[in-house]
Image: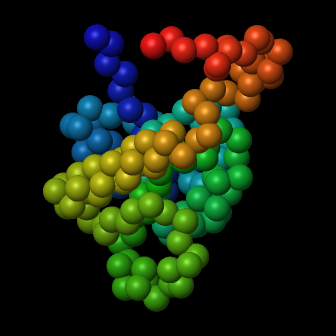
């Protein structure tokens, strides 16, 4: 069996925070890649959007974590990547309009190992649940181009009793 590590993009302007997140995520078996701010992360994602999770600081220069995630949702190939926001200012988090949130989870800095692991696990489980639900609600498991091929194919005779 081939094991493919899940990829996590860590977006934080603080090197110490990136190191902490890196250590925690690697201890869980994740592959990590860094961006020092939202603009760098957008450029990186435009080149390669294959990430399983993004952990982003909320307050950064050039582009806040929330502005980054709003922009992220518009990039091709990034739909469905869950995002955990992080901030050393939990009181600030309480003051924002929750409708403006575009993150799937939130963690307070300094990061406590157990709380962070619980948040990562919860966000990834919800993502998995959404993927399963999406598969169940599709009208057909076949991609659209398969329907085009099938339209010209002979249809089985439903009047024949096979039984």
Judge left or right: residue 49 versus residue 16: right
Can residue 153 be seen here? The reply is yes
The image quarter containing residue 7 is top left
Q: Position of residue 98 (x, y in %)?
A: 50, 80
Q: In front: 125, or 139?
A: 139
- Residue placed furthest toward the left: 114
Q: Nearer the viewer, residue 128 or 99?
A: 128
Which residue does the image show at 31% across and 69% down from the upper left?
A: 108
Q: Residue at x 64, y 20 (%)?
A: 158
Q: Is residue 10 left or right of residue 100?
A: left
Q: Is residue 73 above or below residue 149?
A: below
The colour scheme used to paint the residues is rainbow
Which quadrant: the N terminus?
top left
Expressed as whole percent of the image width and height from the top left, the position of residue 82 reads 47, 51
- On-image quarter of the C terminus: top left
Up/down of 53 relative to 30, above or below = below
Q: Nearer the viewer, residue 43 or 76?
A: 76
Q: Is residue 36 left or right of residue 128?
A: right
Residue 103: percent from the left, percent from the top? 49, 63
Identify the residue shown where x is 47% and y is 55%: 83
**What residue is drawn where x is 38% and y is 78%?**
89
- Number of numbered callouts drawn: 0
Rendered location of residue 87, percent (x, y): 39, 69
**Extreme residue in the right direction:** 152
Can residue 18 be spotted in the picture? no
Q: Nearer the viewer, residue 30 or 79?
A: 79
């Amino acid at each position: 069996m081939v094991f493919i590590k899940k990829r996590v993009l860590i977006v934080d302007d603080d090197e110490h925070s990136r190191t902490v997140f890196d250590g925690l995520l690697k201890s869980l078996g994740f592959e990590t890649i860094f961006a020092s701010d939202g603009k760098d992360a957008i450029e990186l994602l435009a080149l390669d959007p294959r990430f399983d999770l993004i952990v982003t600081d909320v307050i950064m220069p050039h582009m806040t974590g929330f502005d980054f995630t709003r922009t992220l949702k518009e990039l091709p190939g990034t739909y469905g990547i869950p995002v955990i926001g992080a901030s050393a200012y939990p009181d600030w988090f309480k003051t924002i309009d929750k409708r403006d949130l575009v993150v799937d989870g939130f963690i307070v800095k300094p990061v406590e190992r157990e709380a962070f692991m619980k948040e990562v696990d919860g966000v990834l489980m919800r993502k998995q649940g959404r993927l399963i639900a999406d598969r169940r609600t599709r009208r057909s498991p076949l991609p659209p181009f398969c329907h085009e091929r099938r339209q010209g194919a002979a249809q089985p005779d439903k009047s024949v009793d096979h039984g």
